[in-house]
Amino acid sequence: MGDFYVSYEYWFAAVQLVLAMLGMGATLTGRDFRDVVAEPLAVTVGTLVQLVAVPVTAFLFLRFVGVSEGVAVGIALIAAIPGGTTSNIFSFLARGNAALSISITGITTLACLITTPLILSVLVSQYLPVDFSMPTAQIIREIALTLLLPLAAGMLYLYLYPRSAATLSKWSIRGSLLGIVLIVVGSASAGRLDAEAFGGDNMLLVALFSALLALMGYLVPRVLGLSRPDATAIEFEVIVRNVNLGVLIKAALFPAAVSATAALGDMVLFTLLLYGALQMLLSAPIIWLKRQR
């Protein structure tokens, strides 16, 4: 399993991301984006927090906290990727403004075609090997083909076949979750998820970064006086990142089969998967508390 996964790591990541975005698209219609016009303040705040505040937080964190190269690249990836479908679900469960969450996710997903390579180039250039060149065109192509295209295909399917769209979405999301499980199992069997090699200090740093994002996501919308449902939606958009996209970009930048950057790539992958687990652990009590209110 380990050797097979190493040979086809990119395709594992690509397929699971395509399925996730297809599933998300099959739940979206043009009506879901009416909040852009109806609630411009909340949408604007949520989008700016995602595209500006989160990367700035990552920049300051990397500048003032001692972080190894692999962890730094992983944190930069976390900051550069948008929210995902899970943030929309969590907003709904926490009685937040789910429509607002969907709108912000859609806008930042479209924007990441430009913002993701830009944020990465600013945040990680000093942590990469001297001879490493950021493949901006490749990142843009990956986002277009595995993020935006399946998202549009899912929306088109919902428009043409509304009765079966929910089934398509359900099984696509399940397939994506299975893809994540296969990535974890494949990476572990190939010896690439080594907690001891990653180190307890690095785990604490990733946990600290996730806590900072959670704190920022909580404070900013409330300081600006947004309603509780709107603030909750923005909070989950900040906490819950599209780790699927991060894994795909990692696979494109640092293929497991290329030994020269394999060790760096392993650290990046562990950072992404650890953050993915932490965002779930952070979200569960937040949802419970907000439902109690």
Image (cartoon, rainbow, N blue to C red):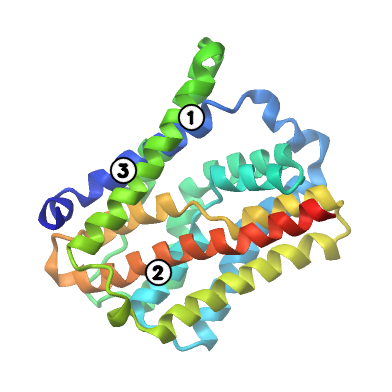
Q: Nearer the viewer, mark 1 or mark 2?
A: 1
- Residue indicated by mark 3: 14
Q: Are marks 1 and 3 in contact (CB under 8 Å)?
A: no
Q: Considering depth in this image, is 36 or 136 the residue closer to the camera?
A: 36
Q: Considering depth in this image, is 149 or 274 the residue closer to the camera?
A: 274
Which label is found at residue 170? Answer: 1
Quarter that holds the C terminus: bottom right
Q: Residue 16: horizontal and vertical position, in percent? A: 35, 41
Horizontal side, residue 106 vs residue 255: left or right: right
Q: Residue 117: horizontal and vertical position, in percent? A: 42, 57
227 to 194, vertically: above or below: above
Q: Earlier in the sequence, mark 1 or mark 2?
A: 1
Determine the CA span between mark 1 and mark 3: 18 Å
Which label is found at residue 271? Answer: 2
- Label 2 crowding class (10 Å Cα cut-off): few <14, some 14-19, many 20+? many
SS label for mark 1: helix
Identified at 46% across, 70% down, the residue is 75
SS label for mark 2: helix
Q: Residue 248: horizontal and vertical position, in percent? A: 34, 51
Indicate the amino acid at tag 2: Thr
- The image quadrant that residue 270 belongs to is bottom left
- Label 1 crowding class (10 Å Cα cut-off): few <14, some 14-19, many 20+? some
Indicate the amino acid at tag 3: Ala
Identified at 56% across, 63% down, the residue is 281
Q: Could one spot residue 220 in this view of the protein?
A: yes
Which label is found at residue 96? Answer: none
Identified at 32% across, 62% down, the residue is 134
Identified at 70% across, 68% down, the residue is 216
Q: Considering depth in this image, is 40 or 257 the residue closer to the camera?
A: 257
Determine the CA span between mark 2 and mark 3: 19 Å
Q: Residue 138: horizontal and vertical position, in percent? A: 30, 49
